[in-house]
Amino acid sequence: MSKIQKIKEKPAKDVNKMQSNQTLNSPVAVSNARIIIENVTPTVDKGNFPVKRVTGEQVVVRADVFTDGHDQVLAFLLFKDAETRDWQEMRMKFLHNDAWEGSFTIATEKDYIFTVRGYASEFTTWQTDLKKKIASGVNIAVDLQIGARMINETALRCLPVEAQKLTAWAAILEKHQDIEAAMAVAVSNELLAIMEANMDVIKSVTFNPAVNVEVDRVRSLFSSWYELFPRSWSAIPGQHGTFKDCERILPEIARMGFDVIYLPPIHPIGQKHRKGKNNSKTCTPVDPGCPWAIGGAAGGHKSIHPELGTMDDFKSFISQARALKMEVALDIAFQCSPDHSYVKDHPQWFKWRPDGTVQYAENPPKKYEDVLPFNFDTPDWQNLWEELKSIFIFWASQGVRIFRVDNPHTKPFLLWDWLIAGVKKEYPDAIFLAEAFTRPKIMYRLAKGGFSQSYTYFTWRNTKKEFEEYLTELSQTNVAEFFRPNFWPNTPDILAEHLQHGVRASFMMRAALAATMSSNWGIYGPAFELCLTEPFPGKEEYNDNEKYEIKQWDWDREGNIKDFIAVLNRIRKENPALQQTRNIRFAKISNEQILAYYKATDDLSNILIIVVNLDPHHTQTGWLEIPWHEFGFNQERVCAAKELIRGEHFSWNGASVFIELDPNSSPVQVIRINQEIS
């Protein structure tokens, strides 16, 4: 590809230029443009939604660009950030079968635009044919005259220095007194470069519409989340924890390597129909209620539960976290307790039953009597939408920039399209995580509409085949252009069956998979690092669930995996290959109980191979086939490698290596390929 250059004119948007997806409705042609541009990628739903990237990521653009006949075609990639007037232009590389490729790197935290321009280059075609005629000994006198004419026409569009060169060369071709000198000029690369750089834009075709690239900050792509309930962190047993109490534990969360601290709703909790232990309808005076039953006498979505502290306490907590290079994420749930002021002040925002009561939330057979959903079919929907957006704006103004959104798939897609765009207009660094465990197309539509990250089905993937198929979908299909997965081994709502029957190695294995397969991952703690396995009978959730009671955690109890998690997060931060998801590829290994995959940076400066024992109870072995050709290494030479969890150094060579994974010591190896040493 050629050097990037700036061009001040915008890509042609002449509606008379016929594109490949246009058809003629009359026998009279509207244009004589001959270039066809098709299959431009990446795009999302034919450009209806933006492609997603973060600062520093590449956008690799491919397109089919061709014309009729045998004329030489050139393709150029045009790109710019959305706030800049001038475009940058780069010549694309021909691949095969009319396919072209170019790329650019996101340099600023601003949205970008790109398009593709194609030319049928009369001069390039002329020079190519001239070389053939010279080789065949054909008389080229007339051809030189034709070339001189094209060169003189182009000189009129050039800067003075280039125009002077072209005029002189045209004179040599026109006179061709020294035929050898004329031929040398005619076929020179310098002449070709100047002619191609100054082609007539009117004779080009530009792909329309241009493709939008939504650019987020890096934490949208690379983050480690730790979820905790602040009320369970009092130093005094049985007492409601506060933000001040939680400041005490921030250094340990930072030591484990997390950079996002996610808090469930911190608002006042309603009294009416308050749930007791394990979601029981029987509630005692000491039951604190579920934080997702939002609203009461002390306020609603823009208030803090009094027992957690004040707004100043919350801001102090944010500040202390920031000092440790962590951010605070808040859960935003669009639902209310029956005590919420919205119910009284805006009854039109809810569904009312014939008996005069408000319809509570249901997911049959589950009933949530303490939670009221909004009625998004209300005639007053515009005021409802504005109020809901103002909740995000309020907390963003308090210093929160990351939001985990509860059940967004039960609210209108167009609400999220509008709301997220509105919030990001005021706070461009806002990040939204969609908590939507639902059908794939719904999850993907939420991501297209603006959600920065998304929960996934990782929690329910168990076998080698399931992981390979699911990660291939997320990383190597068009889904990767808009859907950023966030892998969670557990949540307060989810204790998957493999953890219910698991052992310590099960938790280590799931942490390793989440942390190395996805660039975004998170855990609900301390339940996860303490390896809690007790489910509520017959359900896939924790018994004595923290959602309904205050816990007292022994964070350092024997058997915890805090140090193992700290090592995983350190490895993630030290190895750029783990800081994206779409680069994952799977390797072959001769054991169905071992999952092998590798990640590398674009420049191959950081290459990792990860092998995970999917059997937490038994040692597994196998022969791993190393994809040396992918890394640019010679398999016959000795390669230096390091296992990053235990810090062991060794060397590899040959087509395959023997792997042994004992779940009792470590069910995973993260191996960095360093260099060829012989």
Image: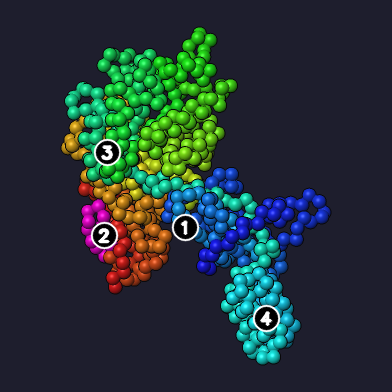
Residue 323 percent location from the top left of the image: 27, 43
Q: Identify the mark at residue 642; answer none if there is no mark.
A: 2
- Mark 4 or mark 1: name the one nearer the start of the chain: 1
Q: Label 2 vs label 3: CA separation? A: 36 Å
Q: Which amino acid does label 1 sit on?
A: Thr
Label 4 Cα crowd, 10 Å radius (few <14 / some 14-19 / many 20+): many
The answer to which of marks 2 and 3 sits earlier in the sequence is: 3
**Horizontal arrangement in the rendering, residue 615 relative to residue 221 (left or right):** left
Chain part drawn in magenta = 641-651
Viewed as shown, does residue 542 lie left or right of 145? left
Residue hosting label 1: 105
Q: Tell me the amino acid under the disc marked 4.
A: Ala
Please tell me whether mark 4 or mark 1 is closer to you in this view: 4
Circles 2 and 4: CB distance less than 8 Å? no
Q: In this view, does 424 lie above or below 588?
A: above
- Tag on residue 320? 3
Of badges 1 and 3, the one in the foreground is: 3
**Secondary structure under the numbered disc 1 in the rendered image:** strand
> Real-space Cα distance between discs 4 and 1?
39 Å
Q: State if disc 4 and disc 3 touch (CB < 8 Å).
A: no
Residue drawn where x is 69% and y is 54% of the image: 14
Question: Residue 452, how many percent across, how many down?
Answer: 45, 42
- Comparing 658 with 150, the one in front is 150
